[in-house]
Image (tube, rainbow, N blue to C red):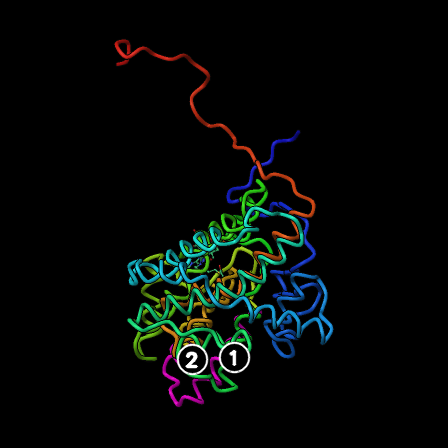
Amino acid sequence: MTEKFSRGLEGVIAAESALTYIDGQKGILAYVGIPIEELAEHSTFEETVFLLLHQRLPTRAELQKLSEELANQRPLPAPVAAILKVLPCQASPMSLLRTAVSVLGHFDPQADDTSPQALRAKAIKLIAQMATLTATIGRLRQNQEPIPPHPTLSHSANFLYMLTGKEPAGFAARVFDVALILQADHEFPASTFASLVVASTLTDTYSAISAALGALKGPLHGGASEQVVRMIREIGEPANAEQYITDKLASHERIMGFGHRVYKTYDPRARILKKYSQKLAEQAQDTRLFEIEQIVEKTVIDALGSRGIFPNVDFYSGTVCYYLGIEPALLTPIFAVSRIAGWMAHIIEYLADNRLFRPTTRYVGPPLGHYIPMDKRT
Ligand code: ACO
Protein backbone atom coordinates (compact mmCIF):
# COMPACT_ATOMS: atom_id res chain seq x y z
CA MET A 1 0.00 0.00 0.00
CA THR A 2 1.37 3.48 -0.88
CA GLU A 3 2.03 5.56 2.17
CA LYS A 4 0.03 8.79 2.20
CA PHE A 5 0.34 11.46 4.82
CA SER A 6 -1.61 14.66 5.28
CA ARG A 7 -1.26 16.71 8.48
CA GLY A 8 -4.65 17.14 10.10
CA LEU A 9 -6.03 14.78 7.41
CA GLU A 10 -6.36 17.85 5.19
CA GLY A 11 -7.79 16.87 1.81
CA VAL A 12 -8.22 13.23 2.83
CA ILE A 13 -11.56 11.62 1.95
CA ALA A 14 -12.38 9.61 5.08
CA ALA A 15 -15.92 8.43 4.21
CA GLU A 16 -18.70 8.66 1.63
CA SER A 17 -21.78 10.68 2.57
CA ALA A 18 -25.00 11.74 0.88
CA LEU A 19 -25.73 14.44 3.44
CA THR A 20 -23.83 17.64 2.82
CA TYR A 21 -22.19 19.01 -0.31
CA ILE A 22 -19.65 21.80 -0.05
CA ASP A 23 -17.72 23.60 -2.76
CA GLY A 24 -15.27 25.63 -0.74
CA GLN A 25 -13.92 27.51 -3.75
CA LYS A 26 -17.31 28.68 -4.97
CA GLY A 27 -18.93 29.03 -1.53
CA ILE A 28 -21.66 26.45 -2.13
CA LEU A 29 -23.31 24.50 0.70
CA ALA A 30 -26.25 22.12 0.24
CA TYR A 31 -27.97 19.54 2.44
CA VAL A 32 -29.05 16.45 0.47
CA GLY A 33 -28.73 18.50 -2.71
CA ILE A 34 -30.78 21.52 -1.53
CA PRO A 35 -28.85 24.81 -1.42
CA ILE A 36 -28.55 26.29 2.06
CA GLU A 37 -29.99 29.61 0.82
CA GLU A 38 -33.25 27.85 -0.16
CA LEU A 39 -33.48 26.02 3.15
CA ALA A 40 -32.84 29.28 5.04
CA GLU A 41 -35.57 30.97 3.02
CA HIS A 42 -38.27 28.29 3.04
CA SER A 43 -37.55 25.53 5.56
CA THR A 44 -37.69 25.10 9.32
CA PHE A 45 -35.24 23.44 11.69
CA GLU A 46 -37.65 20.52 12.20
CA GLU A 47 -37.89 19.99 8.44
CA THR A 48 -34.11 20.20 8.11
CA VAL A 49 -33.80 17.55 10.84
CA PHE A 50 -36.07 15.26 8.83
CA LEU A 51 -34.11 16.00 5.67
CA LEU A 52 -30.82 15.05 7.31
CA LEU A 53 -32.10 11.98 9.15
CA HIS A 54 -34.06 10.58 6.17
CA GLN A 55 -32.15 12.14 3.25
CA ARG A 56 -35.38 13.51 1.73
CA LEU A 57 -37.95 16.20 2.52
CA PRO A 58 -40.95 15.09 4.61
CA THR A 59 -44.60 15.04 3.67
CA ARG A 60 -46.85 17.33 5.73
CA ALA A 61 -47.92 14.37 7.92
CA GLU A 62 -44.32 13.20 8.42
CA LEU A 63 -43.22 16.69 9.46
CA GLN A 64 -46.13 16.96 11.89
CA LYS A 65 -45.21 13.59 13.43
CA LEU A 66 -41.54 14.49 13.79
CA SER A 67 -42.41 17.88 15.35
CA GLU A 68 -44.62 16.12 17.91
CA GLU A 69 -41.97 13.53 18.68
CA LEU A 70 -39.40 16.26 19.26
CA ALA A 71 -41.81 18.17 21.52
CA ASN A 72 -42.59 15.00 23.52
CA GLN A 73 -38.90 14.37 24.13
CA ARG A 74 -38.14 17.88 25.42
CA PRO A 75 -38.35 17.26 29.20
CA LEU A 76 -35.15 16.02 30.83
CA PRO A 77 -35.08 13.01 33.14
CA ALA A 78 -35.44 14.59 36.62
CA PRO A 79 -32.06 13.32 37.91
CA VAL A 80 -30.25 14.91 34.95
CA ALA A 81 -31.82 18.28 35.73
CA ALA A 82 -30.89 17.76 39.41
CA ILE A 83 -27.27 16.92 38.55
CA LEU A 84 -26.93 20.11 36.52
CA LYS A 85 -28.01 22.05 39.60
CA VAL A 86 -25.19 20.67 41.73
CA LEU A 87 -22.45 21.24 39.16
CA PRO A 88 -20.65 24.62 39.34
CA CYS A 89 -22.88 26.81 37.17
CA GLN A 90 -20.00 29.07 36.13
CA ALA A 91 -18.01 26.16 34.67
CA SER A 92 -17.66 26.14 30.88
CA PRO A 93 -21.19 25.65 29.48
CA MET A 94 -19.74 23.28 26.88
CA SER A 95 -18.15 21.16 29.60
CA LEU A 96 -21.46 21.14 31.48
CA LEU A 97 -23.27 20.12 28.30
CA ARG A 98 -20.77 17.34 27.62
CA THR A 99 -21.21 16.01 31.17
CA ALA A 100 -25.00 16.26 30.95
CA VAL A 101 -25.14 14.35 27.64
CA SER A 102 -22.96 11.66 29.15
CA VAL A 103 -25.35 11.43 32.13
CA LEU A 104 -28.38 11.31 29.81
CA GLY A 105 -27.01 8.04 28.45
CA HIS A 106 -27.53 6.37 31.82
CA PHE A 107 -31.28 6.98 31.52
CA ASP A 108 -31.67 5.61 28.01
CA PRO A 109 -32.21 1.84 27.90
CA GLN A 110 -31.37 1.98 24.18
CA ALA A 111 -28.02 3.75 24.75
CA ASP A 112 -25.94 0.84 23.38
CA ASP A 113 -28.36 -0.21 20.63
CA THR A 114 -26.88 0.62 17.23
CA SER A 115 -29.82 -0.61 15.13
CA PRO A 116 -31.16 2.03 12.69
CA GLN A 117 -34.45 2.25 14.63
CA ALA A 118 -32.71 2.83 17.96
CA LEU A 119 -30.33 5.36 16.42
CA ARG A 120 -33.28 7.32 14.97
CA ALA A 121 -35.07 7.26 18.35
CA LYS A 122 -31.90 8.52 20.04
CA ALA A 123 -31.50 11.21 17.38
CA ILE A 124 -34.95 12.63 18.22
CA LYS A 125 -34.27 12.41 21.94
CA LEU A 126 -30.84 14.06 21.70
CA ILE A 127 -31.98 16.80 19.33
CA ALA A 128 -34.88 17.64 21.67
CA GLN A 129 -32.86 17.42 24.86
CA MET A 130 -29.74 19.25 23.66
CA ALA A 131 -31.99 22.32 23.49
CA THR A 132 -33.43 21.74 26.96
CA LEU A 133 -29.98 21.10 28.44
CA THR A 134 -28.55 24.26 26.90
CA ALA A 135 -31.46 26.43 28.04
CA THR A 136 -31.20 24.89 31.53
CA ILE A 137 -27.47 25.67 31.66
CA GLY A 138 -28.22 29.21 30.45
CA ARG A 139 -30.77 29.74 33.23
CA LEU A 140 -28.55 28.29 35.96
CA ARG A 141 -25.68 30.54 34.84
CA GLN A 142 -27.91 33.53 35.60
CA ASN A 143 -28.99 32.03 38.96
CA GLN A 144 -32.48 31.53 37.56
CA GLU A 145 -34.72 28.50 37.84
CA PRO A 146 -34.93 26.40 34.66
CA ILE A 147 -38.19 26.78 32.74
CA PRO A 148 -39.95 23.57 31.69
CA PRO A 149 -40.33 23.18 27.92
CA HIS A 150 -43.43 24.49 26.19
CA PRO A 151 -45.31 21.61 24.57
CA THR A 152 -46.59 23.36 21.45
CA LEU A 153 -44.00 25.95 20.42
CA SER A 154 -41.60 25.17 17.56
CA HIS A 155 -38.14 23.87 18.43
CA SER A 156 -36.57 27.34 18.07
CA ALA A 157 -39.35 29.31 19.76
CA ASN A 158 -39.38 26.80 22.62
CA PHE A 159 -35.63 27.16 23.08
CA LEU A 160 -35.90 30.95 23.37
CA TYR A 161 -38.90 30.51 25.69
CA MET A 162 -36.96 28.11 27.97
CA LEU A 163 -34.06 30.55 28.06
CA THR A 164 -35.95 33.79 28.66
CA GLY A 165 -39.35 32.76 30.03
CA LYS A 166 -41.06 34.75 27.26
CA GLU A 167 -42.59 33.51 24.05
CA PRO A 168 -40.39 35.14 21.39
CA ALA A 169 -41.65 37.53 18.75
CA GLY A 170 -42.17 35.88 15.36
CA PHE A 171 -39.12 37.49 13.73
CA ALA A 172 -36.76 36.56 16.59
CA ALA A 173 -37.91 32.94 16.50
CA ARG A 174 -37.50 32.87 12.71
CA VAL A 175 -33.96 34.30 12.83
CA PHE A 176 -32.99 31.78 15.49
CA ASP A 177 -34.53 29.01 13.40
CA VAL A 178 -32.48 30.09 10.38
CA ALA A 179 -29.32 30.09 12.52
CA LEU A 180 -30.10 26.50 13.57
CA ILE A 181 -30.75 25.46 9.94
CA LEU A 182 -27.45 26.97 8.81
CA GLN A 183 -25.38 25.12 11.39
CA ALA A 184 -27.17 21.76 11.30
CA ASP A 185 -24.52 19.99 9.26
CA HIS A 186 -21.22 20.68 7.59
CA GLU A 187 -19.78 17.46 6.23
CA PHE A 188 -16.68 16.40 8.22
CA PRO A 189 -15.48 19.01 10.73
CA ALA A 190 -13.52 17.85 13.77
CA SER A 191 -16.66 17.33 15.92
CA THR A 192 -18.50 15.18 13.35
CA PHE A 193 -15.35 13.22 12.62
CA ALA A 194 -14.76 12.71 16.36
CA SER A 195 -18.30 11.39 16.79
CA LEU A 196 -17.83 8.95 13.92
CA VAL A 197 -14.46 7.70 15.14
CA VAL A 198 -16.09 6.89 18.47
CA ALA A 199 -19.33 5.52 16.96
CA SER A 200 -17.36 3.28 14.58
CA THR A 201 -16.22 1.22 17.60
CA LEU A 202 -19.95 0.39 18.12
CA THR A 203 -19.88 1.98 21.55
CA ASP A 204 -22.97 3.81 22.89
CA THR A 205 -24.25 6.91 21.08
CA TYR A 206 -23.87 9.14 24.15
CA SER A 207 -20.12 8.49 24.17
CA ALA A 208 -19.94 9.51 20.51
CA ILE A 209 -21.89 12.72 21.11
CA SER A 210 -19.85 13.56 24.23
CA ALA A 211 -16.73 13.31 22.05
CA ALA A 212 -18.30 15.58 19.44
CA LEU A 213 -19.11 18.14 22.13
CA GLY A 214 -15.52 18.02 23.39
CA ALA A 215 -14.27 18.73 19.87
CA LEU A 216 -16.80 21.49 19.21
CA LYS A 217 -15.74 23.28 22.39
CA GLY A 218 -12.30 24.13 20.97
CA PRO A 219 -11.59 27.73 19.81
CA LEU A 220 -10.46 26.55 16.37
CA HIS A 221 -13.92 25.01 15.84
CA GLY A 222 -17.21 26.05 17.49
CA GLY A 223 -15.57 28.07 20.22
CA ALA A 224 -14.73 30.91 17.80
CA SER A 225 -18.15 32.63 17.87
CA GLU A 226 -17.90 33.47 21.56
CA GLN A 227 -14.48 34.98 20.97
CA VAL A 228 -15.86 37.05 18.09
CA VAL A 229 -18.36 38.75 20.41
CA ARG A 230 -15.63 39.34 22.97
CA MET A 231 -13.43 40.89 20.26
CA ILE A 232 -16.20 43.17 18.97
CA ARG A 233 -16.92 44.31 22.53
CA GLU A 234 -13.22 44.92 23.14
CA ILE A 235 -13.09 47.07 20.01
CA GLY A 236 -15.96 49.05 21.53
CA GLU A 237 -16.46 51.71 18.83
CA PRO A 238 -16.42 51.63 15.02
CA ALA A 239 -13.61 54.22 15.04
CA ASN A 240 -11.28 51.74 16.80
CA ALA A 241 -11.95 48.76 14.56
CA GLU A 242 -9.48 49.21 11.69
CA GLN A 243 -6.50 49.95 13.95
CA TYR A 244 -7.39 47.07 16.29
CA ILE A 245 -7.39 44.55 13.44
CA THR A 246 -4.27 46.03 11.81
CA ASP A 247 -2.41 45.69 15.14
CA LYS A 248 -3.57 42.08 15.60
CA LEU A 249 -2.51 41.13 12.10
CA ALA A 250 0.85 42.87 12.55
CA SER A 251 1.48 40.71 15.60
CA HIS A 252 0.42 37.58 13.62
CA GLU A 253 -2.67 36.94 15.71
CA ARG A 254 -5.61 35.08 14.22
CA ILE A 255 -8.83 36.99 13.87
CA MET A 256 -11.64 34.83 15.21
CA GLY A 257 -14.53 34.25 12.82
CA PHE A 258 -12.31 34.33 9.75
CA GLY A 259 -10.76 31.57 7.68
CA HIS A 260 -11.94 28.05 7.10
CA ARG A 261 -10.29 24.76 6.23
CA VAL A 262 -12.80 24.20 3.42
CA TYR A 263 -14.07 27.65 2.34
CA LYS A 264 -11.52 29.75 0.55
CA THR A 265 -14.20 32.32 -0.21
CA TYR A 266 -17.10 33.89 1.71
CA ASP A 267 -18.84 31.25 3.85
CA PRO A 268 -22.44 31.13 2.47
CA ARG A 269 -23.80 30.75 6.02
CA ALA A 270 -22.06 33.96 7.10
CA ARG A 271 -23.62 35.78 4.14
CA ILE A 272 -27.13 34.79 5.29
CA LEU A 273 -26.47 35.58 8.95
CA LYS A 274 -24.99 38.96 8.01
CA LYS A 275 -28.32 39.90 6.42
CA TYR A 276 -30.25 38.90 9.56
CA SER A 277 -27.70 40.53 11.83
CA GLN A 278 -28.24 43.83 10.00
CA LYS A 279 -32.04 43.52 10.21
CA LEU A 280 -31.90 42.76 13.94
CA ALA A 281 -29.53 45.69 14.53
CA GLU A 282 -31.84 48.07 12.68
CA GLN A 283 -34.91 46.77 14.51
CA ALA A 284 -33.13 47.22 17.84
CA GLN A 285 -31.93 50.71 16.75
CA ASP A 286 -28.54 49.62 18.00
CA THR A 287 -26.24 49.22 15.01
CA ARG A 288 -22.90 49.83 16.75
CA LEU A 289 -21.84 46.17 16.88
CA PHE A 290 -22.90 45.58 13.31
CA GLU A 291 -20.97 48.68 12.18
CA ILE A 292 -17.84 47.44 13.98
CA GLU A 293 -18.24 44.11 12.21
CA GLN A 294 -18.41 45.79 8.82
CA ILE A 295 -15.08 47.52 9.42
CA VAL A 296 -13.49 44.36 10.84
CA GLU A 297 -14.72 42.39 7.83
CA LYS A 298 -13.39 44.93 5.32
CA THR A 299 -10.01 45.25 7.07
CA VAL A 300 -9.49 41.48 7.24
CA ILE A 301 -10.62 40.89 3.64
CA ASP A 302 -8.39 43.71 2.38
CA ALA A 303 -5.43 42.15 4.18
CA LEU A 304 -6.12 38.43 3.79
CA GLY A 305 -8.83 37.95 1.17
CA SER A 306 -6.21 37.27 -1.50
CA ARG A 307 -5.13 34.30 0.66
CA GLY A 308 -8.67 32.93 0.83
CA ILE A 309 -9.49 34.21 4.31
CA PHE A 310 -13.06 35.50 4.60
CA PRO A 311 -15.74 35.57 7.32
CA ASN A 312 -16.94 32.13 8.45
CA VAL A 313 -20.28 31.23 10.07
CA ASP A 314 -18.98 32.12 13.53
CA PHE A 315 -18.39 35.76 12.62
CA TYR A 316 -22.07 36.67 12.36
CA SER A 317 -23.68 34.01 14.56
CA GLY A 318 -22.31 35.91 17.56
CA THR A 319 -24.00 39.20 16.71
CA VAL A 320 -27.26 37.49 15.76
CA CYS A 321 -27.37 35.99 19.24
CA TYR A 322 -26.30 39.28 20.82
CA TYR A 323 -29.27 41.04 19.24
CA LEU A 324 -31.51 38.16 20.40
CA GLY A 325 -30.30 38.84 23.95
CA ILE A 326 -28.30 35.61 24.30
CA GLU A 327 -25.06 35.78 26.28
CA PRO A 328 -21.84 34.92 24.35
CA ALA A 329 -20.99 31.95 26.60
CA LEU A 330 -24.02 30.11 25.18
CA LEU A 331 -22.98 30.48 21.55
CA THR A 332 -21.06 27.22 21.29
CA PRO A 333 -23.74 25.20 23.15
CA ILE A 334 -26.28 26.70 20.71
CA PHE A 335 -24.08 25.51 17.87
CA ALA A 336 -24.48 22.03 19.41
CA VAL A 337 -28.27 22.50 19.66
CA SER A 338 -28.17 22.72 15.88
CA ARG A 339 -25.27 20.42 14.97
CA ILE A 340 -26.62 17.48 16.96
CA ALA A 341 -28.86 16.93 13.90
CA GLY A 342 -25.85 16.54 11.63
CA TRP A 343 -23.89 14.43 14.12
CA MET A 344 -26.76 11.97 14.46
CA ALA A 345 -27.45 11.91 10.70
CA HIS A 346 -23.80 11.07 10.04
CA ILE A 347 -23.75 8.38 12.73
CA ILE A 348 -26.88 6.75 11.27
CA GLU A 349 -25.44 6.93 7.75
CA TYR A 350 -21.98 5.69 8.73
CA LEU A 351 -23.12 2.80 10.92
CA ALA A 352 -25.31 1.49 8.08
CA ASP A 353 -22.02 0.39 6.50
CA ASN A 354 -19.60 0.62 9.39
CA ARG A 355 -15.85 0.33 9.18
CA LEU A 356 -13.78 0.94 12.29
CA PHE A 357 -11.66 4.10 11.94
CA ARG A 358 -8.08 3.12 12.53
CA PRO A 359 -5.55 5.22 10.60
CA THR A 360 -1.85 4.86 11.15
CA THR A 361 1.13 7.13 11.88
CA ARG A 362 4.44 7.63 10.14
CA TYR A 363 6.95 6.59 12.77
CA VAL A 364 9.64 9.24 13.34
CA GLY A 365 11.10 7.95 16.64
CA PRO A 366 14.48 6.27 17.33
CA PRO A 367 15.43 3.17 15.33
CA LEU A 368 14.66 -0.27 16.78
CA GLY A 369 17.02 -0.85 19.75
CA HIS A 370 17.11 -2.59 23.13
CA TYR A 371 15.97 -1.98 26.66
CA ILE A 372 18.80 -0.43 28.72
CA PRO A 373 19.03 -1.56 32.36
CA MET A 374 18.88 1.30 34.89
CA ASP A 375 22.57 1.12 35.99
CA LYS A 376 23.77 1.26 32.36
CA ARG A 377 21.89 4.47 31.53
CA THR A 378 23.95 7.62 31.27
N1 ACO B 1 -6.71 35.26 11.04
C1 ACO B 1 -5.48 35.51 10.60
N2 ACO B 1 -4.75 34.63 9.88
C2 ACO B 1 -5.34 33.46 9.60
C3 ACO B 1 -6.64 33.14 10.02
C4 ACO B 1 -7.34 34.10 10.76
N3 ACO B 1 -8.56 33.87 11.21
N4 ACO B 1 -6.96 31.91 9.58
C5 ACO B 1 -5.88 31.46 8.93
N5 ACO B 1 -4.90 32.39 8.94
C6 ACO B 1 -3.58 32.29 8.34
C7 ACO B 1 -2.65 31.46 9.24
O1 ACO B 1 -2.00 32.24 10.18
C8 ACO B 1 -1.73 30.85 8.22
O2 ACO B 1 -0.77 31.80 7.88
P1 ACO B 1 0.76 31.37 7.55
O3 ACO B 1 0.66 30.48 6.35
O4 ACO B 1 1.44 32.66 7.30
O5 ACO B 1 1.24 30.65 8.78
C9 ACO B 1 -2.61 30.63 7.00
O6 ACO B 1 -3.69 31.56 7.14
C10 ACO B 1 -3.18 29.24 6.93
O7 ACO B 1 -3.71 28.89 8.21
P2 ACO B 1 -4.11 27.40 8.61
O8 ACO B 1 -4.34 27.33 10.09
O9 ACO B 1 -3.14 26.44 8.01
O10 ACO B 1 -5.44 27.26 7.79
P3 ACO B 1 -6.59 26.26 8.06
O11 ACO B 1 -7.25 26.05 6.80
O12 ACO B 1 -6.16 25.04 8.81
O13 ACO B 1 -7.46 27.15 9.08
C11 ACO B 1 -8.97 27.66 10.74
C12 ACO B 1 -8.75 26.98 9.40
C13 ACO B 1 -8.35 26.79 11.85
C14 ACO B 1 -10.47 27.78 10.99
C15 ACO B 1 -8.30 29.06 10.77
O14 ACO B 1 -8.74 29.83 9.68
C16 ACO B 1 -8.52 29.79 12.07
O15 ACO B 1 -7.78 29.57 13.04
N6 ACO B 1 -9.54 30.70 12.12
C17 ACO B 1 -9.88 31.41 13.34
C18 ACO B 1 -10.76 30.54 14.22
C19 ACO B 1 -12.18 30.38 13.66
O16 ACO B 1 -12.80 31.34 13.22
N7 ACO B 1 -12.68 29.14 13.74
C20 ACO B 1 -14.04 28.82 13.29
C21 ACO B 1 -14.02 28.01 12.04
S1 ACO B 1 -15.63 27.72 11.44
C22 ACO B 1 -16.21 26.50 12.46
O17 ACO B 1 -15.52 25.66 12.94
C23 ACO B 1 -17.63 26.49 12.66
**Residue 102 in view here:** yes
- What range is drawn magenta here? 268-294
Amino acid identity at mark 2 = Leu
Q: Would you say the magenta stretch is mainly helix, strand or loop? A: helix
Residue 336 image offset from top left, x and y in percent? 48, 62
Which residue is pictured at 44% across the width and 89% down the height?
283
Cα–Cα gap, marks 1 and 2: 9 Å
Question: Is residue 49 placed above or below 201 in the rendered structure?
Answer: below
Question: Is residue 334 placed above or below 105 in the rendered structure?
Answer: below
Corner quadrant of residue 21: bottom right
The number of callouts visible is 2
Q: Is 37 included in the stretch rendered in magenta?
A: no
- Kindly identify which numbered label has been placed on residue 175: 1
Q: Where's the C terminus, which quadrant? A: top left
Judged left or right of residue 267, residue 288 is left
| Callout 2: SS | loop
Contact check, label 1 and label 2, Cβ < 8 Å: yes
Q: Where's the N terminus, which quadrant? A: top right
Q: Is 271 included in the stretch rendered in magenta?
A: yes
Residue 356 image offset from top left, x and y in percent? 61, 38
Which of 81/228 is in front?
A: 81
What residue would you read off at disc 2?
324
Amino acid identity at mark 1 = Val
Which residue is pictured at 37% across the width and 71% down the height?
146
Judged left or right of residue 198, residue 61 is right
Which of 376/139 is in front?
A: 139
Question: Is residue 185 placed above or below 106 in the rendered structure?
Answer: below
Corner quadrant of residue 71: bottom right
Judged left or right of residue 360, residue 368 is left
